[in-house]
Amino acid sequence: MDKTRIALLALAFAAAQPLTVAPAQADDQSNHGRDLFMANNCYQCHGRVGQGGAGPTLAPPHLMSQSD
């Protein structure tokens, strides 16, 4: 095998591996999406929990029922 083919196989193998996040990193970033949603004023149209209003509903029904 030539070097190019070996490199492509290595990349394919690396891409096939599942990405894992350490629990500490996941905890640190758990509210990142919510923070962006609030900072960019998305809540003004989509509601504070994504329930919709001027904009479409973003949250699944089971999440909206938990906020009531």
Image (tube, rainbow, N blue to C red):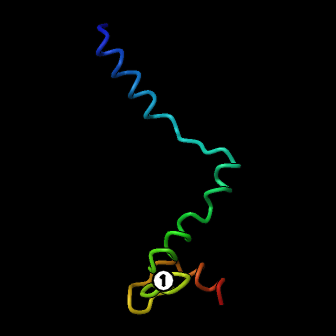
The residue located at (45%, 80%) in the rendering is: 41
Q: How far across and down, in percent of the image, does residue 11 sit?
A: 39, 26
Q: How many labels does the image show?
A: 1
Q: Residue extending furthest front?
A: 39
Which residue does the numbered mark 1 point to in the structure image?
43
Kind of residue sitting beneath label 1: Tyr
Which residue is situated farthest in the right direction here?
24
What residue is shown at x 45% (from left), y 87% (from top)?
Answer: 44
Seen from the viewer's position, the closer of residues 38 and 59 is 38
Q: Is residue 1 above or below residue 58?
A: above
| Residue located at (59% from left, 79% from top) | 62
- Nearest the viewer among 32 and 52 is 32
Q: Nearer the viewer, residue 61 or 11?
A: 11
Name the one closer to the observer, 45 or 63: 45
Label 1: element kind:
helix
**Residue 40's quadrant in the figure?**
bottom left
Is residue 59 found left or right of 56 in the rendered image? Answer: right
Instruction: Point out residue 47 in the picture as x, y percentages from the top left corner.
Output: 50, 87
Q: Alpha-carbon neighbours of circle 1 within 10 Å: few (<14), some, or many (≥20)?
A: some
Which residue is depicted at the point 62% across and 86% down?
65
The percent position of residue 32, horizontal first and vertical second, equals 56, 63
Figure check: 51 above or below 10: below
Q: Which residue of the protein is positioned furthest toward the top in this rendering?
A: 1
Where residue 15 sits in the image (x, y, percent)?
43, 34
Q: In which quarter of the image is the C terminus?
A: bottom right
60 above or below 51?
above
